[in-house]
Amino acid sequence: MKSKLKVAIAGLGHRGKDVYAYGTTHFPDLVEITAIADTDPKRVQLVAEQFHIPQEMCFHSAEAMIAHEKLADAMFICTQDRQHVKQAIPALEKGYDLLLEKPISPDLHECREIIEVANRCNRKVLVSHVLRYTVFYQELKKILDEGRIGEIISIQASENVGYWHQAHSFVRGNWRNSDITSPMILQKCCHDMDILTWLTGKTCKRVSSFGSTSYFRAEKAKEGTPERCTDGCPYQAECPYDAEKIYLPNREHGVPVAITEWFDKVLTLNPTEENIYEQLRTGSYGRCVFHSDNNVVDHQVVNLLMTDGSTINFTMCGFTHENARYTRIMGTMGEIVANMESNLIQIYRFGYEPEIIDVSKLTADFSGHGGGDVLLLEEFIRYALGEPVKKNTITTLEQSMESHFIAWAAEISRLQQGQPVDMDEVRGKIRV
C-alpha cells in the first residue's frame, strides 16, 4: 500500500478547518494531517483534539510552523490574501508541495515571484479554483468541447453574490477593504475569470470595467443610524442587512438557516445565542453596513475582448436574493443557458428541440462550491502523491495566473473610469 500524503495546514478559518481539514476525512487511506497552525489558540486546540494532532505539532502562526524543520509532504495555505506568498515561498524552499488558496496574491510582483520559486524548487502547487472540479462545469465543458453549439461568439455571465454574503464577507468581514486584502474582482471573481477562459479555451486580448461602492457608504445611512446594529437602531425592522437577521436564526426576514450556521461558525467556535450577541456587540460583524471601513465594490461589470474577436460580459452584484452563477453562451449553431443554482443546463441547438440536462442526476454531492471542494482536495492529494490527474482541470500556478491578470486588468480599468486595458501590458509590462 502506498504511504499516505502527510499535510500541514496553515490557517484554520472556514477554508482551512471546515473545508480542508474535515475534507481529508473523505480520504483516510490517502492523507493524514500531521501539523496545524493558526493565530487563534482555540481553533488550534479544537482541530488538534478532533484530528489527534500532538501538542508539539501545533503552532501559533504559519510562520512558526514553516520555520520548523519540515513536518509534512505538503502544506495547505489557507491564511489571508496578503499572507499567501510570504508564507508560500519559504514553504516551497523547505520542500513542501502546496495547495494554495486563491487569490495567489493581490500583488502581481508576488505572483511572478512564487512561480519562479516553485519552478526553481521543483515543487507542485495547485491553486484552489474549485469551479473547474464541479460536475456542473465539467458537464458544461464537455458540451462545449463537443461543438454542440458551434463556435462560441459571445457569453453573458453573472455572479449573484447574495445580499447577505455581500454584507457578511465584503462589508463587515475579512475581505471588506482592498488595502488589507484584495480588490473584490480578484478575491471573489478570479473564480469566474478562470472558469470562463477554461470553458472557452480562449485568450483575453482587452478588458474594460465599471463598478463602485454605491450603497454601503456612510452618506447612505439614515439620520440617527447608530454605529452598531445592537445599539438600538430605529430602522432595524426594515433593514435586510441588520446583523441580528443575518446571524441569529428564526428572526423575521432572516437568511436561510444553513447560511446563518455557516456565518456563525466564523463569528465564534461555540455559536450559542449569547456568544453570537457578544460578537455582534464588540466585533466587526455587528457594525452597521453604512458605518464599516469597507471600500470594495458592491457591483461591477467587466467586458472581455478575446483574441479571436469573441466577447464576454461579466456582472458581479451584491444586491441579489441568492448566491448563484448564471451563464448564457451563444454560439454559431445554438446557445446554452446554464444555472448553477438550479443545476440545469439548457441546450438550444438552432432548428432542434431544446435539451435540458439536470446535473443533480449526475452526482449526489453538492456540498462546498457545488461539490468542487472535495473533488479539488482529492485532485491535489493524488497530484502530490504522483498519481495521474485530469490535465484539463488542474489549476497550476501558471494556469491560474491568467485569471489573475484579467482581474487586475478589470480593476485597473475600473479605477480609470472604464478605460480599456491591453492584456499584454498587464501580463508583461505593468507592475501593479
Image (tube, helix red, strand yellow):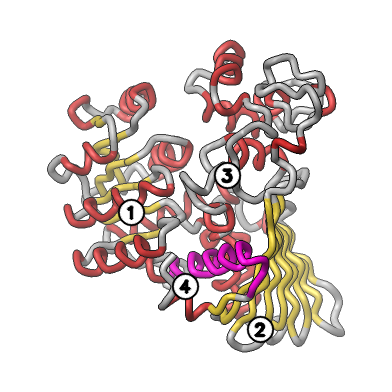
Measuring from the top left, give residue 374's x and y in whole percent: 47, 49
The residue at 80%/26% (across/down) is 223
Give the alpha-carbon distance from disc 1 to disc 3, as whole Å: 28 Å
Q: Which amino acid does label 2 sit on?
A: Gly
- Which span of residues is magenta-colored? 399-419
Q: What element carries label 2?
A: loop
| Residue 68 pos. (x, y %) | 15, 40
Query: Most extreme residue toward the top, as rendered?
Result: 274
Q: Are the two marked residues, 3 and 2, in contact with CB atoms closer than 8 angstroms?
A: no
Do the CB atoms of the residues marked 2 and 4 lie less than 8 Å apart? Answer: no
Q: Which callout, 1 or 3, points at the residue further toward the start of the chain?
A: 1
Q: Nearer the viewer, residue 263 or 151?
A: 263
Is 154 magenta? The answer is: no
Mark number for residue 390? Answer: none
Residue under the image location 80 percent in, 30 percent down: 222
Using residue 93 as the reference point, say whether residue 420 is left or right of it: right
* Residue assigned mark 1: 85
Say which residue appears at 36% left-offset and 64% top-offset: 109
Q: What residue type is labelled 4?
A: Asn
Residue under numbered circle 2: 147
How many other residues sit within 10 Å of disc 2, few (<14), some (14-19) or many (≥20)? Answer: some
Residue where numbered disc 4 is placed: 392
Task: Of the two numbered discs 3 and 2 on the same chain, state the one appearing first in sequence.
Answer: 2
- Residue identified by numbered label 3: 367
**Residue type at mark 3?**
Ser
